Image (cartoon, helix red, strand yellow):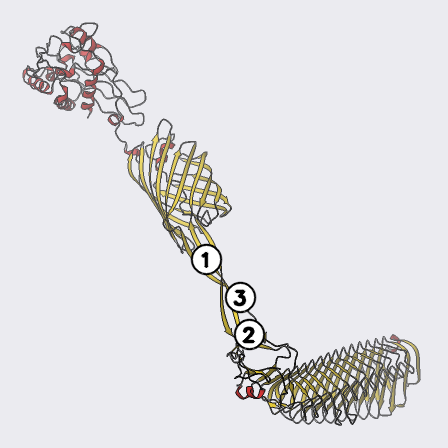
Amino acid sequence: MPTNKLMRCLYITCPLLGALTSNAVAQTVEGAATDLPKTTGEATLSNTPDSEQTSQTQAVSTWVAEPETTLTSETVKPEFALSPDIVSAPQPETNPTSDTAQPEFAPIPATVLAPKPEIMSTPETVKPEFALSPDRVSAPQPETSPTSDTAQPEFAPIPATVLASKPEIMSTPERVEPEFALSPTTTFTPNSKTAEDVTPSPDVESEASLLAQTTTPEPIPPSLETTENPSLRVLPRFGGTFTTGPGIGYSNSFGSIEGFVPLSQTSGSNLTFLEGRLSLSTEDSNLGGNLVLGHRVYNAEANRVLGGYIAFDNRSTGNSTFNQIGVGFESLGESWEVRGNAYVPLGNTRQLAAETIADLGTSTSDPFFQDNFLAVTRNQQQQLNRRFEAAMTGVDLEAGVKLASLGQTGDLRGYAGLYYYDAPGSDEVLGWRTRLEARPTDTLRLGLALSNDATFGTNLVLSVGANFPGTRLRGLSQDEQVLARLGESPQRNANIVVDEQVESELLTTQDTVFVTNPNTGQPWQLRHVNLGLGTGNGTVETPTATVAEALAVAQPNDIVYVQPGTNPGIPAFTIPDGVQVLSTGPVQRIDTVELGNVQLPLSGAGVLPDVTGTVTLGNDTTLSGFSLNAVPGAGIVGANINNVVIRENAIANSTAEGISLSNVSGQVAVTDNTISDSGREGFNLNNNLGQVDLVVAGNTISDNGALAADGDGVNVELRNDATGTFDLTNNTITNNLGRGGIADGVDFKLFDNASGTANLTGNTISGNQLKGINLDLEATTTGTLNLSGNTITGNEAGGLDVLVSNDASGAFNLIGNTISNNQLRGVALAFADRTTGSINLTNNTISENQDDGVYLQLSGQAQLNANLSNNLITRNANNGIFTTTNGTAQLRFLSELNTITDNGFTGLSLITLDSARTLAAIRANTLTGSNFNDLEVLTIAPGTTTCLQPSNNTIGSLILDDSVGGPIQVDAGTLPTNNISTSDFTFWSGTTVSPGTCGF
């Protein structure tokens, strides 16, 4: 290769030598080898090794064999020979751009210079009457590549035989004598002239003179002058990166492994590469990948790396898989750089990721009847939510600058740029991103990026990566950092940007549903009756004409639904077990699975069908919405049954009870009825056995008992072992009159071993001929009475009267009641025999009763704890509170914070007789304005005992008298704590006891 370069140079700069053909040169070499002695066939430069001379000789032989060396049509005559001592190579010059010494040219062996007569045959003969001076024979100095430190190869010396040529090849201003010899020290420097620049001249002297001129060669093409440097090659590498999430178009952090493979490169000039990456999400293990094919070139003049690439990307979100094509460009320099990318999804770019249905509830039409069923049109609304994932088409552009150098090869760079993404169904995304990238070493890179847009929000992303080996070329100096960037990875968004889109659709389904009985799980069935007008089988379309027809086909849990029609009057009937007989008069509601409690169509019409005979109840039956007027006997009866409902009926003028139940157990509800003018009780329950839970609520019960001696508004009797709970709520019970004068508003009796609890709340009980409420507990019964919020007024024989006898026991709680204007006592409780009990009166108003406000009587061995607090007891005709304890009975009495004023006789009177005992604490009461004494304590009989603890009361007048009875013991130190206007201790023994003796 060096010889070829030299010969090509000589063709351009030395046209004289081109006249020689390859055949002539070969003959010259052969003749010189045979005719010249060895002493003259060697080069005169002693510092050239034999081996080099040999190789140089062979190189020349190779060159002269090329056919293009024929430049003339004349035959060269070989009548000359160059002297061996004139053939030598010039000393090379040093290339100013390289520190590497240029190679010396080896001397040309003299044997090569002896021509043979038959070198070539041409139409024109070349006259050889001249010889080139030795100082003209020299190879040009090779130039050194500015991008390589590699020494250029040496050029072999030119054999002298080649220099024989035709005199007319060139013309020069001065002639060259043929008899000359080249000096071994002569330097030959070619100029830039080519064969076309030289004009041949027949003048031999001019041609020789031209050869003697110093010339500069044409620049050598880089492909000829540069040998590839392995140290500048970009090597394959692998690496890994971890990137935090969320970021632009992704949610989770991910790690990746990557490989960079050069496909083709010219060292220090250009590079074609392939880079692959496999990514794995850290939270859901979703895979993604990238394959990038790129090409970069190094521009030495601009000192920049220019590149472009095309990429194929893949990403799985767990629900969808997307592919895209990406392209990008980059311009990388030492101080600044710029790059841009475009991303175009392929295939199905919008995929369904999830679908959910949210139940928005059910709306229904008003119920309607269909056949024997109650139906509704149900509109069920659901919201269908579809979540799509859409790969977004986008571009990004960023520019960066170098901020600092890190160590020998590292740097810190800052970048800022914009990005834009869009996808069908998504809002356009326009955002900005800034980032820092640090490469402290050739193998480690760190990144921190901050981005913001309206869709993906603000994200701060950290990345850490490493690759092995590094990206820096091994043959570069520290100042050649830009060239090192040939092997960097392209900077682009490795994740396909995916936007989540949510679409909602409202779904409505409509169907007809037969509503269901929650007790049975089966659809309600109704037997329709249109009195006097029906002609069918009981469907709503063809109702029956009579209740009896409907009852005949009714099954348990059916409803016989009666419209008044012409209503000629319904005769007496019996309701089969499990059947409800309802009319359209009141609002009728039933419980359903689908709708909860729902009103039946047609109900609320206000007309109650007439019933002319007694209605007999069965088990689990309901009667609602009928008028029972002037029924012979009781209006409604039930015996030995369970669970009945009687509601919203009008029962009047029955010759016996309005409602009469006996031995009915379970749930009994009597609500919202009007019961009036019955010959006996308005409502009567008489049980000898079983457990009953009775609710009597919202009824108006009045003017009953006109035909019987006992005409209570409500009468409940439990005997033997019967038990029950009686809830009387919000009823109005008035003006009930017994023909014999025995007519209480409410009469509650327990006999034998029965037990029960009566809860009376919010009732108005007034104007009854006897007591408002009467309660009898006899034998060994146990009873509890709770009265709250009732108004008990204007009753002829008292508001509340309680009798506990034999071995019975009772607890009585009166809270927040108004008991006033009754003809006798407001509240009267009598405990006899061996009874025990307690009474709690709190926050009641007991006023203007015609006898005592509160009356407590104990006899026999009875024991009672009475607590009265915060009551207003005023203007009663006799005593405000009067207690009398007889026999061996014992009363424990506490009066606290009561206002007892303006009563007709005594405010509070405590009287103890026989061998009885009274323990009383009177605290913080106001006792004033009574006509006799405001507080009096008397013992009448020597065996009595009274222990008194009066404290902090306001007392208008006080009298203590134990003159004829046992001592009245006063808790020492308590009397002075009271505010007493007038006191009379004339008949008191003055007995005091230590504090606490009275038991309070």
Mark 1 falls on what kind of element? strand
Does 746 sit left or right of 983 as displayed? Answer: left
| Residue type marked 3 | Gly
> In the image, residue 638 lies at what x, y percent?
63, 90
| Residue type marked 2 | Phe
Q: Residue at x 18, y 5 (%)?
A: 175
> In the image, residue 606 lies at what x, y percent?
66, 78
Residue 278: in sight, yes or no? no
Which is more N-terminal, label 1 or label 3?
3
Which is more N-terminal, label 2 or label 3?
3
Along the line of sight, the residue nearer the viewer: 113 or 431: 431
Q: Is residue 432 above or below residue 989?
A: above
Which is more N-terminal, label 2 or label 1?
2
Does 687 sit left or right of 204 as displayed? Answer: right
> In the image, residue 905 lies at what x, y percent?
90, 84
Quarter location, residue 473: top left
Q: Which residue is mark 3?
A: 361
Question: In the rendered view of the protein, which quadrant contains the C terminus?
Answer: bottom right
Question: In the rendered view of the protein, which quadrant contains the N terminus?
Answer: top left
Q: Which residue is mark 1?
A: 386
Q: Which residue is mark 2?
A: 368
> In the image, residue 336 lies at what x, y percent?
43, 32
Q: Residue at x 70, y 84 (%)?
A: 758
Q: CA distance from mark 3 to mark 2?
A: 21 Å
Q: Residues within 10 Å of mark 2 (few under 14, many from 20)?
A: some
Q: Residues within 10 Å of mark 1 (few under 14, many from 20)?
A: some
In front: label 3 or label 2: 2
Quarter location, residue 37: top left
Q: Residues within 10 Å of mark 3 (few under 14, many from 20)?
A: few
Q: CA distance from mark 1 to mark 2?
A: 37 Å
| Residue type marked 1 | Arg
Mark 3 falls on what kind of element? strand
